[in-house]
Image: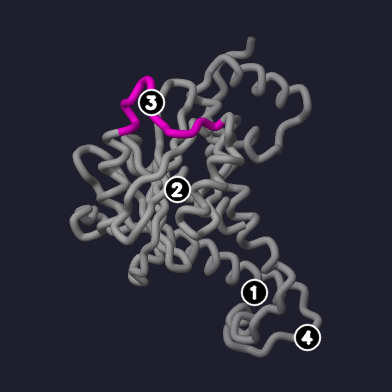
Amino acid sequence: MMKQPDSALLHAFADGQLEAAEHTDVAQWLTSHPEAAAEVAAWQAQSAAMHAAYDPMLDDAVPPHLLAAAHGGRAAAAGSRWGMAAAIGWLAIGLVGGFIAGRNTDTAPTTTAQIPLARQAAVAHAVYAPEVRHPVEVGADQRDHLLGWLSKRLGHPIVAPALEALGYQLVGGRLLSGPAGPGALLMYEDASGERLTLFVGADTDESATAFRFAEHDKVNVFYWVDAGYGYALSGTLPREQLLTVATAVYRALNP
């Protein structure tokens, strides 16, 4: 068994940059180190989300003002490879910066009293996540029935994002009452027993289309609104770890 790989080697593994033999060695090491494996899986999920979001834009025409900026204000020659490369560099910086800014939250968390659905989600998590015998109404072994039932009750398609790459398996779900009608609660669990819950319910708060972060009685919540429905991912994970999962959930719901 190889010795513990450093961060650079793990990042290279996550990015698929290792030779076959070294890749195999790292993969074998990860099988006996689940925490490191989960972190690597999180990196891979973030990378996949970035590629899914921005790779299609590489075929778009570069805006003239970016071409001009790449040449210090001079008009770019139509066939200039260097002008095109520099402009794409500017574009990439803008896209990545926009992605990070769009996902960042205020330094100080909001209170869940300001966000009814987030409060409901945090309370539901606190109530059901510790439950041993009956954490959900319908288990993941009846996934199709669960999602069909919840979708019918909410009048909105309910999707259970696949989070296996981050180490989380669907436990199941239940129907709850939300601030504006029925709500759906989906529960996930990792190998250590850490649980996350995704609450979905009607919400028309247009100011919350970007991610918001809130806390309620030691439960952290990332919350956003999309097409009239609010989504709140809750857990006791540290804020940055929960953001990684919330970003993966968002991308799974908006492929």
Disc 1 target residue:
87
Distance, label 2 to label 1, CA atoms, is 31 Å
Which amino acid, mark 1? Ala
Disc 3 target residue:
134
Q: Is residue 223 left or right of residue 33?
A: left
Q: Is residue 140 visible?
A: yes
- Which of the pair 70/21 is nearer the observer? 21
Which amino acid, mark 4? Ala
Q: Is residue 32 left or right of residue 190?
A: right
The residue positioned 59% from the left and 52% from the top of the image is 49
Distance, label 3 to label 4, CA atoms, is 65 Å
User: Image height check: is 137 above or below 214?
Assistant: above
Magenta stretch contains residue 137: yes
Q: Earlier in the sequence, mark 1 or mark 4?
A: 4
Distance, label 1 to label 4, CA atoms, is 13 Å
Disc 2 target residue:
246
The residue positioned 52% from the left and 34% from the top of the image is 170
Image quadrant occupied by the N terminus: top right
Name of the residue lying farthest toward the top: 1
Residue 78 marker = 4
CA neighbours of label 2 inside 10 A, class few (<14), some (14 to 19), many (20+): many
Colouring of the image: one colour
Provide the residue span drawn in magenta: 128-140
- Which of the pair 92/195 is nearer the observer? 195
Which amino acid, mark 3? His
The secondary structure that dominates the magenta segment is loop
The residue positioned 39% from the left and 48% from the top of the image is 199
User: Image height check: is 90 above or below 46?
Assistant: below
Q: Earlier in the sequence, mark 1 or mark 3?
A: 1
Mark 2–mark 1 contact, CB under 8 Å? Answer: no
